[in-house]
Image: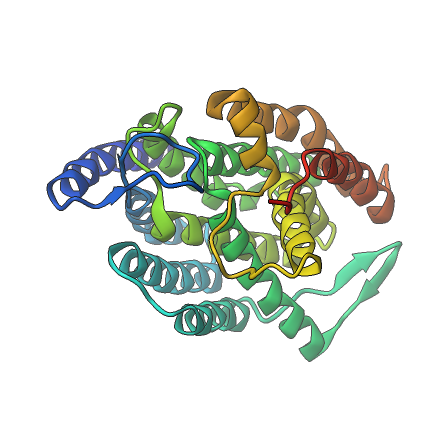
């Protein structure tokens, strides 16, 4: 049954992306290149809606099959729909940043309500229950995740490949950590994104748009918080696997703040954008996949198995990524 569902989700995503591409072309919903763009030809946008629809349709089935708890279902569907609607509206027009941010925090609060807040954090052998402070940190984490995913969706295939490799990696982590019951939601997200990637791999024939990128950010963040309730160490495995996006987006934001730049304005100074101008979209997208699988995945497994403590594992994962961001002058014009 689940195998059949995986096939259906992929087919729905692939077919709906094709429909959305035709719709975008007919309505002139195009991403027009400008001086900040990483692409050179007008390209349809908004294809990420196919990921949203395919994935959200699968979740109730997983719940009926008894492999997705009701609280997780409610958290993922409620927050995912809200963020996708906000992104879809912004793709078709413009929503003021303050209203988008309000919607983001409402979605984060929804996730935390259904997941019972932030799970106790395991750090250096000590379990820390942060209570209401943890809920605030969890909300900030979710809002940052969905926004950084939006920031990092700037070249062909990158956001899709990141989601696929991170989710496949975490499924393996779940297996070795003895929490294999958690694999089904990320596995469904893998096939939903894969259907879209068929149209988005360099050279992209359609872009994801805010509806898709923000949705992926909130869903990945929510699944990480859900996993922490099963095994506290899993939150660190998620953060390690997401290291490329977290480091690039955070380093770039901090560097722009220090430089006095208006951080709410569009720019093209992320490390991945500078790398793409040097080596091309395909090379950068494939490189990120290799980093996730060859470097970050083994570290995430070693941390969850207790072979590395959290601090050592995070430092080993993030230090080379920070060096790469520095060398590529991320955050500088």
Left or right placement of residue 253 versus residue 48 in this view: right
Vertical arrangement, residue 180 with respect to residue 104, above or below: above
- What x and y, as percent, mark residue 99? 40, 73
Q: Quadrant of residue 122?
A: bottom right
Q: Quadrant of residue 179?
A: top right
Q: Quadrant of residue 325?
A: top right
In x, y percent, where is residue 124?
88, 54
Identify the residue shown where x is 14% and y is 42%: 23
Q: Is residue 17 left or right of residue 184?
A: left
Q: x, y percentage for residue 268? A: 51, 43
Q: Is residue 69 left or right of residue 195?
A: right
- Residue 2 visible, this orientation: no
User: In the rendered view, would you say 113 is above or below 255?
Assistant: below
- Front-most of residues 80 and 204: 204
Quadrant where the C terminus sits is top right
User: Looking at the image, which residue is at 65% across and 52% down?
Assistant: 250
Can residue 195 be seen at all in this image of the molecule? yes
Expressed as whole percent of the image width and height from the top left, the position of residue 303 reads: 79, 40
Q: Looking at the picture, tell me which residue is in the foreground, 47 or 301.
A: 47
Q: Point out the residue furthest to the bottom here.
A: 132
Decide: is 26 above or below 198: below
Instruction: Check the picture and name the quadrant holding the N terminus.
Output: top left
Rendered residue at 53%/28% (across/down): 276
- Relative depth, front residue between 270 and 21: 270
- In front of the other: 7 or 37: 37
Q: What residue lies at 28% left-to-right and 48% top-to-bottom? A: 53
């Amino acid at each position: 049954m689940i195998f059949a569902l995986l096939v259906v989700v992929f087919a729905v995503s692939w077919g709906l992306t094709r429909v959305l591409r035709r719709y975008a072309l007919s309505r002139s919903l195009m991403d027009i290149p400008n001086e900040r763009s990483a692409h050179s030809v007008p390209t349809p946008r908004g294809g990420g809606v196919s990921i949203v629809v395919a994935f959200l349709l699968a979740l109730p089935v997983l719940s009926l099959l008894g492999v997705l708890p009701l609280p997780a279902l409610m958290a993922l569907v409620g927050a995912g729909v809200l963020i996708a609607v906000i992104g879809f509206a912004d793709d078709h027009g413009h929503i003021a940043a303050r209203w988008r941010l309000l919607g983001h925090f409402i979605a984060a609060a929804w996730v935390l309500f259904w997941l019972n807040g932030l799970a106790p954090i395991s750090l250096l052998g000590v379990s820390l229950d942060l209570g209401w402070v943890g809920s605030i940190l969890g909300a900030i984490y979710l809002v940052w995740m969905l926004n950084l995913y939006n920031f990092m969706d700037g070249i062909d295939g990158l956001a899709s490949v990141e989601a696929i490799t991170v989710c496949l990696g975490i499924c393996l982590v779940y297996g070795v950590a003895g929490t294999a019951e958690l694999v089904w939601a990320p596995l469904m997200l893998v096939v939903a994104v894969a259907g879209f990637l068929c149209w988005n791999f360099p050279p992209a024939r359609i872009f994801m748009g805010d509806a898709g990128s923000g949705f992926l950010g909130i869903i990945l963040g929510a699944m990480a918080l859900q996993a922490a309730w099963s095994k506290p160490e899993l939150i660190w495995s998620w953060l390690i696997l997401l290291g490329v996006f977290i480091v690039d987006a955070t380093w770039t934001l901090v560097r722009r703040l220090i430089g006095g730049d208006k951080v709410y304005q569009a720019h093209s100074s992320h490390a991945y954008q500078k790398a793409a101008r040097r080596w091309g979209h395909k090379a950068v997208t494939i490189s990120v996949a290799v980093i996730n699988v060859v470097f970050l995945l083994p570290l995430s497994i070693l941390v969850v198995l207790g072979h590395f403590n959290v601090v050592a594992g995070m430092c080993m994962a993030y230090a080379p990524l920070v060096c790469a961001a520095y060398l590529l002058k991320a955050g500088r014009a």
